[in-house]
Image (cartoon, rainbow, N blue to C red):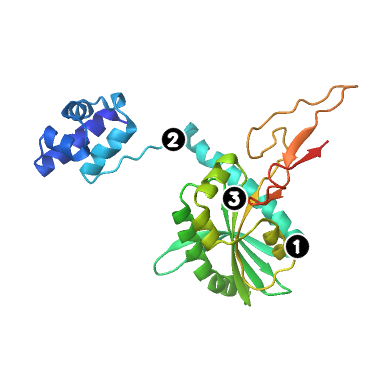
Amino acid sequence: MDLVRLGLGIRALRRRRGWRQRDLAAAAGVSQALISLIERGHGDRVSVQVLIAVAAALDGRIIVQLRWRAGDLDRLLDADHALVSAVFVGRLQTDGWETRVEVTYASSRSTGSIDILAWHPETRSLLVIEIKTEISSAEATLRKMDEKLRLAAGVARERFGWVAASVSNLLVIEDTPTNRRRVGASHALFGSALPMDGRAVRRWLSRPAGAIAGRLFLSPSNRGSAIQKRGGRQRVRRTAGPGERPDVSVARDEFQDADDPELHGRTILVG
């Protein structure tokens, strides 16, 4: 963040309104001394919350971005999303589904892409799947899912010739403690919009009948790498030398039910 530019911007917006520093301080609920610090380029001496409040009082926004190695962070995050998607696509294909990933759409009011669009030929069931490696806003997630659900039947028919008898909606969430906590905090919201979960979803995937709206936690493990990806800590396992016993890796069951205490935290041993 360019703090000098930030300070100059705050000052310009304040003067545009005809405000004194004390007027802006009153509107933001902070002291005049803090406004002076910010405008002189010392924003690093106040909290981010103060910066947000000051900008909001001027109808502005503070946007903080994390950048790493000229875009490598985006590729790293995309890799997590791709891993979860690939594991789930494999499960769907085992159950007889045809799949398409990153299916783009455009309407008069919105554009985007469906993470996975799945088709069950035997029952003519269409499944719209949203993959989330991190739950940040329940409302935004569900709003975008509803948009994709409304457009999916037309996209499937026009792009792939799939004429659906039913259209279902499924949110697949990477199984991490943070995601479980956030889903739990919005349990009423998720439960109302996506009532089916866990084992019920898995049963439906194997024998789809009618339309559903559901959610499923998925904990993929990247067994092709030395690093196992799972909710919680990641450990690098040392390769055993001659005559040594190999390390035993522990991974969660791939498809866990967030509301099933018997399955929560269940482990399987992989030699």
Give residue 174's position: percent from left, percent from top: 61, 47
Which one is nearer the viewer's eye here, 219 or 117?
A: 219
Q: Position of residue 244 (x, y in %)?
A: 87, 22
Look at label 3 and name its amino acid.
Answer: Ile
Label 2 is placed on what type of residue? Leu
* Left or right of residue 226, residue 14 in this image: left
Q: Which residue is mark 3?
A: 173
182 or 43, which lies in front? 182
Q: Which residue is mark 1?
A: 95
Which mark, by number, is residue 7?
none
Question: Measuring 54% from the left and 49% from the top, which residue is drawn there?
Answer: 183
Of circles 2 and 3, the one toward us is 3
- At 75% from the left and 65% from the top, the residue drawn is 96
Q: Nearer the viewer, residue 118 or 5?
A: 118
Q: Residue at x 17, y 34 (%)?
A: 25
Q: Which mark is residue 66?
A: 2
Residue 67: percent from left, percent from top: 45, 34
How far across and down, in percent of the image, does residue 76 sit? 56, 39
Q: Judge whether 139 appears above or below 169 on screen.
A: above
